[in-house]
Amino acid sequence: MGKIKQNYQMRGFKRNRFEEYFKNIGGIETSRGVFESSDWKVILSDEESVTIGSIKFPEVDVEIICDESVYDEFIESYKIKFLTAGG
């Protein structure tokens, strides 16, 4: 079975929120910012600050590497948790 790799540049969430999420779904932190399970691996960048207008947002790059067999379910859960739309 193959692997699928996806990168997300996430703004508005602090790095520790991602760390907590990936631990809660069964990931083990194998090194700083790297969370793994038998079916997936996630690599988090250091948190940076991005300014848009007069507002500062935390920014974290999230690299997800997932087995094809669990990819759709994994990404759907991730998106429900972290992808938001303003309005």
Image: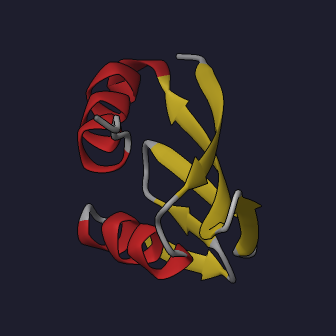
Residue at the spot 65% in from the left edge and 62% down from the top edge? 60
Query: Residue at position x 55%, y 75% from top?
Result: 15
The answer to whether residue 45 is visible is no
Question: Percent from the top left, x then y, of residue 33?
Answer: 65, 74
As drawn, the residue found furthest toward the front would be 54
Q: How is the image coloured?
A: secondary structure
Residue 66, above or below 72: below
Quarter of the image with the C terminus is top left
Q: Nearer the viewer, residue 10 or 2?
A: 10
In front of the other: 20 or 27: 20
Q: Kindly identify the residue that appears in the image at 34 percent across and 38 percent down.
A: 86
Q: Is residue 24 visible?
A: yes
Please report the residue visible at 34 percent of the width from the left and 35 percent of the height from the top: 85
Compared with 60, 73 (above or below) is: above
The image quarter containing residue 26 is bottom left
Is 40 left or right of 76, judged from the image as shown? right
User: What is the total number of numbered labels drawn onto the structure image?
Assistant: 0
The quadrant holding residue 32 is bottom right
Residue 71, by quadrant, is top left
> Is residue 85 or residue 24 the one in the foreground?
85
Where residue 23 sits: x, y (%)?
35, 73
Residue 19, horizontal then vertical, whole percent: 45, 75
Q: In the visual, does 38 lie left or right of 47?
A: left
| Relative vertical location of residue 32 with respect to residue 78 in this rendering, above or below | below
